[in-house]
Amino acid sequence: MSLILNEEQIFLKDSAKKFAAEKTPTKHFREIRDSEISNCYDEKVWSEMVSLGWTGILVPEEYGGSNFGVAGISSILEELGRTLTPSPLFSTAVVGVSLIKHANEEIKKEILSKVVQTGLKLSFAIEESNRHAPLNISCLAEKAGEDYIIKGEKSFVLDGGFADKFIVATRTSKNPGDKTGISLFIIDSDSKGLEVTPTKMVDSRNAANIKFNEVKVHSSRMIGDEGQGFEVIESVLDISRAAISAEMLGGALEAYEITIDYLKEREQFGSKIGSFQALQHRAAIMFSELELCKSCVVESITSFDEGGNDSERLASLAKAKVGEVFHLISNESVQMHGGVGVTDEYDIGLYLKRARVAEQIFGNSDYHKNRYAELTGY
Amino acid sequence: MENLENFRKDTKAWLEENCPPEMRKPMGPGDVVWGGRDCKFPHPDAKLWLERMGEKGWTCPTWPKEYGGGGLSFDENKILQEELMAVRARPALSSFGIWMLGPALLEFASEEQKKKYIPDIVKGKIRWCQGYSEPGSGSDLASLKTKAEDKGDHFLVNGQKVWTSYADDCDMIFTLVRTGPLEPKHDGISFLLIDMDQPGVTTKPIKLISGKSPFCETFFDDAVVPKENLISDLNKGWDVAKRLLQHERNMIAGMGLGGGSSSKKKKDQPVSSGMATMAKTYAGEENGKLADPALRQKIASFDINSHAFSLTLKRASEESKLSNSGPSPASSMFKYYGSESNKLRYELMLEAMGTKALGWEGEGFGPAELAITREWLRTKANSIEGGTSEVQLNIIAKRVLDLPQ
């Protein structure tokens, strides 16, 4: 796979960088966080993203998208990650769109065009426990004539508090832990019996807990075949893991750069603290680890677009490595800032908070180390 | 692209005809060909293979043709390496001349010097060693004291070098010598090539914890060196030295590769991890998984880092092709990571093999097991030679991160 971005991807990355600098610097994030807007995203910013075509980057041209690929949208997310831009872009344009692409023609026409044109917001309800466990699905969908009745609960539903439609992973047969028997449905957020409780996370972004109190859904709203949902889920999760790794890389790079700047300006004992070897070596290690992360991310995000046959393992490679390094850098950055590092006034603490939430999304480093080992035959 | 395809076709054909069958067999520890005036070949085919490769300049594929190199482009060299790998060809020649001295000569030597020394490196006629460190100058290399006095038509060299690899088997040594004052220390150093075949140069092997002696002490007592052996200007040797160290670091960084599961996945072929396969043999497996979960987790971490590292080396090479630049201060990152990773690789092997990795000699252990024990001890020098890990981190902090000094 490519280890260098092509011109098109660089163009997207540059325009996202400009966008983030102008429209969504961290100041913007703070404003939303401290305002009455409970959703933690800005409608105006979202509609600008939509008009730039970002929601259509993974959408095929016949449905109005640009089909610029996973590397394209991930490059944008990396830049938005640098300024901690909160938006439904990841949930909608990466996870949601990738799921809908597996649906039938009618659904694709209906939903994808709305995502591209009007910024219809999608959210994926999969998790049921405190840690990522995509096979442990017990939320039931029972067949009743032409319909299915969904009963159960979901948690950590990203951007679930304000989504227009949910894609929910349910069990239609077999037991939690089985690869077969999982089915995916599209549910409108105003469906009867759907109880959405927004949860504000430590990074001030929005997730939700959802209760399905016998929610009725027509069988035509199923994605793929009954009981065969897991294959779809795994392929979508891998794209999403690669993309969120790119966002995390952006956050890690920014936290690192902010810290290096601080080392060059802060004085103690009559010297710049960056002249102390105790800090220099740790900074040099952060630099080295970030170089490794960049390679993992670019290899992983380009593998989907170039039809690589190792995409699963590369997604786990990226999520495991970047997760570990963002963890390290977020801790080191706060420590190297000293006292001001734990104040709300300085941005550095915001990266620490985002790091921990992002680490959990679709599997933390331990989860992906284990998966990497499995995929490598041990 | 068409030219490249032709190049591949021609290369395939040439290798088919010219790579002797014996040179396509796996290499044992004694099979490395180092070249030199008294070159020892493990097999007559090794001599033939070196002559043929040397004639094409393919021992140094990207060096200019006028000095005996292959004159290949980045892409052509990539193809050559792929085709060499495809027939499992052994390296025709391993040498510090290729890895370290040659690139520095190409950059800093005079035309006359290039014509004199580089073709012999390509053909493996002269075996080189490196005379940098001294007993009192390790990490603080620039404090070196070995003195070269100007005697009109020659230099007279006195002093001692240490950690000179294979000095007892080498023909020539490239050295850093003091030709100017001790302060400022970087400004009195020159880069000098010294013929070791003279009474003023003697060597003494150093026995390491591994039981082997790959390094020597080298003594200069009134060694005579012609003036034309000075590379670059007088007292400008530090610039050459730094550049050469970058090449050395890249070479050592390469040790961080292999062993992990970093290889590209081939179609319909499952990937595997060399380390994990080995660990399964010694520590057992359950349902296809390595039986010891803690060891498995450590190996997974190692494999992930090793995979990430090899991708990074590849990325750096693609980027340097785009910007047409040589090694940069970031090569310190590769040296740091590569050597630390190689040390970890052997520590993990020891952990996986248990007491089987702790034999010293004789009965009860296989030759491969005994070799791993010795190699584990050898790897401890990886993060010391060519600049310690700490020195690499200093260089990154100063030259890459631009932190205040």
Image (tube, coloured by chain):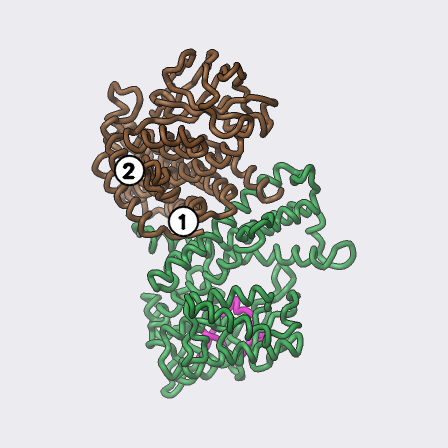
Q: Colour of chain A?
A: brown
- Residue B29 position in % (x across, y down): 65, 66
Q: In the image as oriented, which residue stretches furthest toward the bottom?
A: B153
- Residue occupied by mark 1: A291
Q: Amino acid at mark 1?
A: Glu
Residue B347 seen in the figure: no
For the residue pair A41 and B198, the one nearer the viewer reads as A41
Disc 1/disc 2 C-alpha distance (Å)? 30 Å
The residue sitting at 40% across, 71% down in the picture is B104
For the residue pair A2 and A268, the one nearer the viewer reads as A2
Determine the secondary structure under disc 2: loop
In which quadrant will I find the C terminus of chain A? top right
Determine the secondary structure under disc 1: helix
- Residue occupied by mark 2: A53
User: In the image, which residues are magenta?
Assistant: B157-175
Kindly report the secondary structure that dominates the magenta region of the rendered protein. Answer: strand
For the residue pair B70 and A256, the one nearer the viewer reads as B70
Which chain's residue wears label 2? A
The answer to whether residue A129 is above or below residue A241 is above
Residue B162 belongs to magenta span = yes
Q: Residues within 10 Å of mark 2 (few under 14, many from 20)?
A: some
Chain the render paints green = B
Residue B294 belongs to magenta span = no
Q: Residues within 10 Å of mark 1 (few under 14, many from 20)?
A: many
